[in-house]
Image (cartoon, coloured by chain):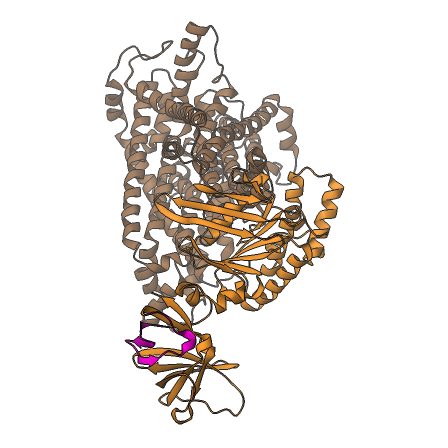
Amino acid sequence: MDPLRKVRVNISNVSMSYGQTPVLRDVSVNIEPGEFFALLGPSGSGKSTLLRLIAGFNQSQSGTIAIDDEDISRVPPWHRNIGMVFQNYALWPHMTVNENVAFGLVERRLPRVTITRKVAAALELVGLQEYGERRPNQLSGGQQQRVAVARTIAIEPKVLLLDEPLSNLDAKLRVHMRTELLALQRKLGITTIFVTHDQEEALSISDRVAVLDQGVIQQVGTPMELYDNPVNRFIANFVGTINLLPGEVRGGFFDSPDIGKFRLPAAIAVNDGKIEIAFRPHTLTLSSPDRSTGPIQLPGTVSEREFLGEFVRYRVKVGTAEIVADQPHLGGVPDFLPGHAVTVSIDPAQVRLFTA
Amino acid sequence: MTTTVHRQFTFTQAAIALAIALFLMLFLIVPVLMVIYVAFANPDGGLTLQHFASFFQISLMRESFWNSLIVATLSVVFASLIALPLAYFTVRFEFRGALLIQTLGILPLIMPPFVGAVAMQLIFGRSGSVNLLLGEWFGFNLPVMQGLNGVIFVEALHYFPFILMNLVVSLNNIDSSMEESAQNLGASGLRLFRRIVFPLAMPGYIAGAALVFIKVFDDLGTPLVLNVTNMLAPQAYLRITSVGIEDPIGYVISVLMIGFSLFALWASALVLRGRDYATMQRGYSGLAKRRLKPWQTVIAYGWIILVLLLVLSPHIGILLLSFGNIWSFSVLPDSFTLDHYKTVAQDSPRMVWNTMLYCGLAATLDIILGTAIAYLILRTKLPMRRSLDFMASAALAIPGVVLAIGYLRTFRGVQLPFMDELLTSSWILIMLAYTVRRLPYALRSCMAAMQQMHVSLEEAAENLGASKQRTIYRIVVPLMAGGILAGFVTSFMTAAVELSATIMLTTAQNDAPMSYGIYLYMQSAAGRGPGAALGVLAVVIVALGTYFSHRLIRSRAADQEARPLQKIEV
């Protein structure tokens, strides 16, 4: 199959509610041509609703959805030419694989030769050319998903929508399929929107990610931007693991009810007031109390220890707070056992502040 | 008992299985085989096709053959035409009519078609209410009750619920993503229905249609009451009762009837093979429901009300007839009276009692057999246990007339022990025919109830020291009670209105059940009133029984909601 024309998707000021319950609140986001774009959020955040809105299965109360500046909000689903791969694949059990893939082409009244050729091409693209005569229930989960993808791209849609495409696969296959999906998307160049609740999935393959919570887009950015510069505590918590400490800044000192008071380095000096400081576990350094150096040092006691291969995850009791610290594991490096007194060193460059 | 390993069969289980097999052999398999044998047997015992040849040489027989086929086929067609839109309305649209449609689905079933047939003639017949009015106002008539038309009309109206209910179930099992993905790929409207929705609902439709075909083929009462005798079931009955139990033509007809039933079952099984279309997924919903547009509401309600009127007309007609003094060549009866009920009260208490006795015993036997078979199949590793299910379910394909003929022939001259009576002239045979014919339904109910019960519930009881027998008594039966009761009710209700076998096996007025009494009354014009009154009585008994058992089942279901395991295995 040839690369497809790349389109831009503009979602502007979309609001939607089911009865009294708002599901999406004033959502605006622009998806660039050819982008692999993820909608990430916990369940109930509105991400699937937004996807279904783009496909035309839901109607928003206000706002517009445009493809290359053409408003499609009022176009019925069957005229949108936006392909969607369903979470459960939705393969029709009464049709063979070939018939499933041909379905959309038949609806477009294409000549039979063209249909045969396009079905073969689509199945070849997902590596299932031998399976055309099978029924969906004769295929494994991974194969069913490939058929669902082939069926969708066979119509050469303007946009590809993927609704939690990997959630029905086992862990190993999931990692394999996501690279395969990305390769396919790069090959076709099709603008792709991908819904997931799994942050690892979103961060690993997307060009950009929009994180939704309670029907509001909290932040849009590249995976690294989201990880390094979360705009609020929700993002900080939802994307990756992070330590959050509430407290107050007064005269250059940070005062936390949990861990006491310490001087903030000039690098992160802020105005007085209530704030939360946040730092990721892998940016911390643990050391024995006598050997510690650095601008921020907190004394604590190891309470738990989990060995995860590449690193060891410690939970350190500092004051009344528990801080998670990941230390890279290298052969021969001594580790700290529960009950050991340690010093937690925080690199000021890695600290983020959220005003409460 | 020393065997405690689960799922190994014990001596008791084998003995019970053998006893059930023996019962089914004696009262189902052997009589049916006997019928088939006689149809192919020479007077000297050799095999021959001569009887079939002579069957097709009689023009009345050829005519009956085609008529039966046409009536059964067209009844399926018309039943489908009624049921399809109704099923689609309930599943697709959000409107209150859905409740009406559910009522529509039950109403016809509480009155046997042959009871309604007389009333239908008075309402839709050549000189019935509707045609009198049509003739008076518009100068034309609708010949819906003439000859075969009447049989088709009555059967389609009576049996469409089988298609309706099966279709609704399978439409409800279609996941919304099936439809949405088709829309996403460009399908909508009628094409969406034709290419996706209907094919996915096909299994339910086929199951219902096959059932209707078999039921119509099997029905003896309706043609007889409508005085249509040129069909297979009436011919079988007439040949055996008038020419005699030796007449081979009756057996040829029986074999043909079994053949058609088997064909319908085989064809539906063929279509359904490998099509388990349960597409529902966790967390997904059924087909999207839409609000009706005003003009659609008008059409939907129009159709529902039309069907409702048609469905209710036999009920209304029979009620009018039971209270009517004289009802002939008039839109409504001339005057009203309670005399028919008085006649019935004098004549028929014995029949009501007989119905209660036969059906009560038959239904009890059914649930005992049903529970035992279900247990043997689902909970033991007994060899050949599946054949019990097969034997019991085979009864579905055997028309009542055929079973009765088989009984009369097989048990000819058999003396009842300790009594000076022949088995063939005793009510015991009627009761056994009911038992065998309703067993498939009771068995399905019991199987379903047991399938829903996780085996760990029994294992837990055994783990805590209960023996197999004690486990069945304390755990299995109480948990299955709802399903068993449902099985009992279905068996009882449907046996109470059975006529095909009843008519052939009833030999003495004293042993006659209600269904036979109604039929007898309906034979004469003067008997119609009392016949209708007895019909109303039968409907009331069936309806009350259904209502109370539903209440019983529902209150039990409420009790059991607290059990979380019920949901795991569904």
Residue B26, horizontal then vertical, whole percent: 47, 47
Between A188 and A318, which is closer to the camera in this rendering? Answer: A318
Q: Is residue B175 visible?
A: no
Between B200 and B381, which is closer to the camera in this rendering? Answer: B200
Q: Which image quadrant: the C terminus of chain A? A: bottom left
Report the residue at 38% width, 48% height from top: A22
Residue B241, horizontal then vertical, whole percent: 47, 28
| Side (left or right) of B219 relative to B417 | right
> What range of the chain is rendered magenta?
A245-271
Q: Quadrant of residue B499?
A: top left
Between A351 and A239, which is closer to the camera in this rendering? Answer: A351
User: How many marks do you count on the picture?
Assistant: 0
Report the residue at 45% width, 27% height from top: B296
| Side (left or right) of A301 relative to A333 | left
Residue B178, horizontal then vertical, whole percent: 54, 46
| Side (left or right) of A84 relative to B528 | right
Residue A82, magenta (yes or no): no
Residue A266, magenta (yes or no): yes
Residue B523, horizontal then vertical, whole percent: 39, 20
Chain letter matching colour orange? A
| Side (left or right) of A190 relative to B217 | right
Chain letter matching colour brown? B
Q: Is residue B87 above or below residue A175?
A: above
Q: Is residue B266 above or below residue A274?
A: above
Q: Is residue A14 above or below residue B52?
A: below
Between B299 and B67, which is closer to the camera in this rendering? Answer: B299
